[in-house]
Image (cartoon, helix red, strand yellow):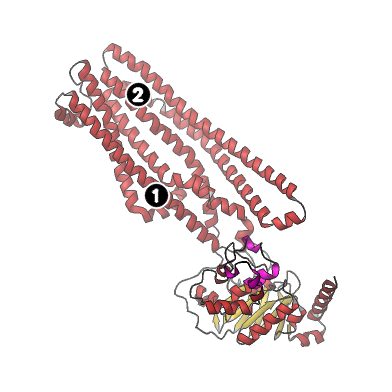
Amino acid sequence: MLRYAKWLWRYYRGHQRALIFLLAFTPVAASFMVVQPLFVKNIFDLLGTGAVKPTGLPWVTDWFDQLAQGRIGAYVLLLIVFAFGDVVAHTLTIGHRAYMNIRLEWEFRQESFSGVLDKGPDFFNRFNTGDLVTRMTDDVAEKLSWFSCSGIFRFYEALIIIVFSLVMMISLNPALTLWIVCTLPLLVFVYVKSSTRMNRRYDFLQKKISAVNDTMEACFSGVRVVKAYCREKDQRTRFAEVADQRQAAEIAAVKTGAVIESLWMYIWQFGTVIVLVAGGWYVIGGSLSIGEFVAFNTYVLFLMYPMFDVGNFLVRGMRAAVSMKRLMELEDHPPMIVAEENKRSIPVAPPGRVEFDKVHFRLPGMERDILTDLNFTVEPGKRVALVGRVGSGKSWAARLIPRLVDPTGGRILLDGRDLREYDLADLRKYIGYVPQDPILFSDSVESNIRFHREGISKETLEWAIDVAQLREDLTAFPDGLATTIGVRGMSISGGQKQRLALARALVGRPKILILDDCTSALDAGTEAGLWDSLHEVMPDLTCFLITHRPATLEKVDEVIVLDEGRIVERGGHIELVLKEGVYCKLYHRIMLEEAVGGAA
């Protein structure tokens, strides 16, 4: 519980004025409400006996009695004034609570989303996309946003009304008040017995909601494959299964919550019935006036709705606690890369010399290194190919250069300085990276190339399009640069996706370019044109290539051969072919595969 309070306080600290207002003004609003039955009591007393029966709280009522001077009209006027004050005060508190709900929801989601962007590969291996979407939408909007302010401050208001009302009831008739108080231990017992079961129900429900979202995301992302293999029926069946499981979990949670809230209200109403019977007996016996009886029953009603708010707070608080725990689970994974402040800015035109110095890398939780003792230097303007069998560590070595991950041993130097000494944003600004599976967004072609980077001129944009060999495709798009492509580029071909991703990497005019097997869908002529353009317009570009194209391997300055995370061979293309080692066998196999593929 303390951990949840600390987590919420992080967000409350930015809204201290609103919090102080709610803390201070909620008792004022409650006071306007709780005083009103006393005026009703006095009106009935004056109508019945012609005199106001004093309460046990003269310091509360004397001022009003002196002001009214026994006149019914004066008490009616006071009742109207305080009722109006009640409306105004509650309108202000409700408005502040609503604003805080919306604002805190935005902050919960924004911080969670920003935190997820900093996580490493192991994080995304554990949390599926659908699960992350559920945590940042359903957990935040449906479960946490209302509770974080309205839930807590309605509970706070309910406690104040309960205390104020009980004080007033004791002043009217202590014995009758005791009948109401006797029901409180039963209410506590119901809550204690139900809390564990409710937490389990809500935790299970949130997992099933995540499963539904994950199933939808996986199906829609792979819809081409689903249709190609005619698996629509299987997908419908799978979705129906997880949707049924979610429905069953929701029904179980709603039933449990309804039973708890109903028991809560039934116990309270049982106490109310006792008060009506006992109160009537006191009126008949003359120890309770009609005015006191009416006021007392009004206070019982005042207690009923706050008690419902307390029960609602406890039930929804359990759901909010589950959602808080699910958001805190995202935070418990430290970011893969920490962008520290006051780091060295990268020069405007860095030479681009890259050196791997005894580099090791492994993922958290793994027992063996993915990369082991990598040592090599790439001079500015050189083109280097990283080759090896599947799983040899080529892509991980490439990801180390823009600090998508950091080495677990050794260091990587850029122009003689450790990458970690540079400002992370500056470093990545001068490194272009195109992954093996280019990711595009449901936006225009131009927006996908610019990718929210300011200061890119129209001339630079056109230049990147030409170098990436995208010009011919662009003329075929219905709206040119303004053409909107589907999610993940589903509306364009694989080659167009790769060329568009290349244009995105080139538009920042990087000094280092990393291409992770991202030209596999290009035809030989287009790829040759790409390398010729790069060599012509960016002769000083340091380039790292991961490729299975023989023609590309023949153009590089150096080939580094990896096997099980270690460098086993290194040299020029012709040199390594003549050596007849690992690279020679790999190269001939690639040649054979390309020949067979071309013949097919």
Question: Which residue is tagged 1?
Answer: 100
Q: Secondary structure at mark 1?
A: helix
Which of the 4 quarters of the picture holds residue 62?
top left
Q: Position of residue 336 (x, y in %)?
A: 56, 66
Instruction: Please identify the quadrant where the C terminus is shown.
Output: bottom right
The residue segment tinted magenta is: 473-500
Give, as a three-letter code, the residue at label 1: Met
Note whether 42 is above or below 572 in the view shown: above
Q: Residue at the spot x=43%, y=24% of the render?
A: 269
What is the magenta segment's predominant secondary structure?
A: helix
Q: CA distance from mark 1 to mark 2?
A: 38 Å
Instruction: Tell me the kind of residue under disc 2.
Output: Leu
Marks 1 & 2, CB-CB < 8 Å contact: no
Q: Which residue is mark 2?
A: 178
- The relative height of residue 397 versus residue 325 in the rendered view (above or below) is below
Q: Height in image: 65 above or below 542?
A: above
Q: Secondary structure at mark 2?
A: helix
